[in-house]
Structures are given as structure tokens and as C-alpha cells.
Amino acid sequence: MKLHSNSSPSFINIGVLLLFAIVIAVASTATTYYFLSSKTSEQSPIIQPPVIPPVQTNVIPTTPPPTNNQIITPDQTADWKTYINTDYGYQLNYPEILNTEIPDNAPQVFIISFAEKQDEYLEIEVTSISSLGLNQEIEFDMQRLNASKATFQNKPAVSIRPARNIYPGEPFKAMFIYLENKRFKIELGYYGNGTNEELFNQILSTFKFTE
């Protein structure tokens, strides 16, 4: 005869309940941990790395070296001879190959010959200003030589431009410089046909007063 036990179903039910309770507990614990972790991460401040300002450096500009397009013009008068007149306080430079002359009977004259025949030359002559005065002297020279008023190194002057028809004894081109305080004028005249006009201009550019 078989005996039936009534306790087996009860043990099974209790085991199921315990398992269910454990699952609930584990799930509740996991949920609580996740919730607390989320709150902690939300409340924790975000630490930003420090911002380092850029270091300013002083850049010194440099002059670029000359390029191939920059042409340096040499001074063509650098090796010229210098004539100094201490009596009238002026000087100028001229090419060494040119002949010069100071006439014995005219020490106030200095001549630079451009050609062997002496038909092309530069003449510097110092003459006195007339008793009429500076303004009248300038007006007289302008009318006599068909010249125009000018200035030379801040001094009054008249300039004779190249002329087509040159009267005998008159310069092709000239500059008269007036020194009123010394009562004389300096005449720089180019006599010739204009072949050496550029050379005359170069010599004239070196002229300066020493007093």
C-alpha cells in the first residue's frame, strides 16, 4: 500500500516564494544603486582644464635684402677732382681728364675745357654787382640774356636755357648766382653747341659754397 506525502507541494511553494523574493531584492538593489549613481554624476561639478593665454612675442621687422629689380646707381662724380676757390668761397668737381685754366690776367675766371680745340668749355667768372642794386642787376641780366628767374641753393639766380640761335660770345646754357652780401655774382656758363650739355649739368650739380 502506497503512502502519499502532503508536505512536498508546501516545500515547493516556499522555495518558489524565496526565489521570487531574492529576485525582487536583487532588482531593487540594482535599481537603487543605478539611481544613486545617476544622482551623484549629475551633482558632481565638471572640472574644466585651465585656459592658458597665448604668449605674445615681439616681432622685430627686418629690412628685406635688395632684390634683383633694385638698381643702385653709382656716383659718377666720386673720383673727380675738386677745385676750391678760397677768394670767392666756392668749389666744384670735374673729371680729371679735362684741362683747366686760370688766365693770368683774370684770376676771377676758371675754365674747364671739354675739347682740345677749346670750342666746348665751362667758364666760371666772378663779377661785381653794379651800383644799381641786386634787383636791377637781375632784371638787366634777364633782358640781356633772355633768361628766367631762378634760385640756386637758396640764393637768387637767373637761368639761361639752351638756345637755338646763340650770339657770339654768349653761352649756350648758364646760371648766374647773386650774392648780395658780398656784392658779386658768379656766372657758370657752358659755351659750345650743346654736345657736352649733360657733362655741364653734372659739374654744375657738384657746385657748392664753402662759406
Image (cartoon, grey):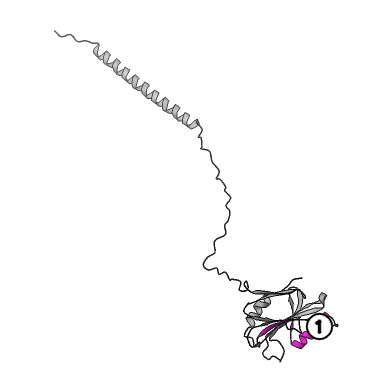
- The image position of residue 131, as x and y in percent, is 86, 82
**Which quarter of the picture shows residue 2?**
top left
Specify whether residue 89 is painted magenta.
no
- The quarter of the picture where the N terminus appears is top left
Q: Which residue does the image show at 44% across and 28% down from the upper left?
A: 37
Which amino acid type is shown beneath numbered disc 1?
Glu
Q: Is residue 30 left or right of residue 130?
A: left
- The image position of residue 117, as x and y in percent, is 64, 88
**Which quarter of the picture shows residue 207?**
bottom right
Crowding at dot 1, Cα within 10 Å, few <14 / some 14-19 / many 20+, comes out as some
User: Would you name the residue on which mark 1 appears?
Assistant: 137
The vertical placement of 53 against 126, above or below, is above
- The image position of residue 26, as x and y in percent, is 36, 22
Q: Secondary structure at mark 1?
A: helix
- The image position of residue 121, as x and y in percent, is 67, 84
Specify whether residue 143 is painted magenta.
yes
Q: Which residue does the image show at 80% across and 79% down from the upper left?
A: 184
Q: Is residue 157 left or right of residue 200?
A: right
Identify the magenta region: 121-149
Can the viewer see residue 206?
no
Residue found farthest to the front: 104
The vertical placement of 184 against 66, above or below, is below
Can the viewer see residue 141?
yes
Q: Which residue does the image show at 65% across and 74% down from the upper left?
A: 81
The vertical placement of 150 against 72, above or below, is below
Q: Which residue does the image show at 25% across and 14% down from the upper left?
A: 9
Residue found farthest to the left: 1
The foreground one among 87 and 163 is 87
- The quarter of the picture where the C terminus appears is bottom right
Q: Is residue 133 left or right of residue 93?
A: right
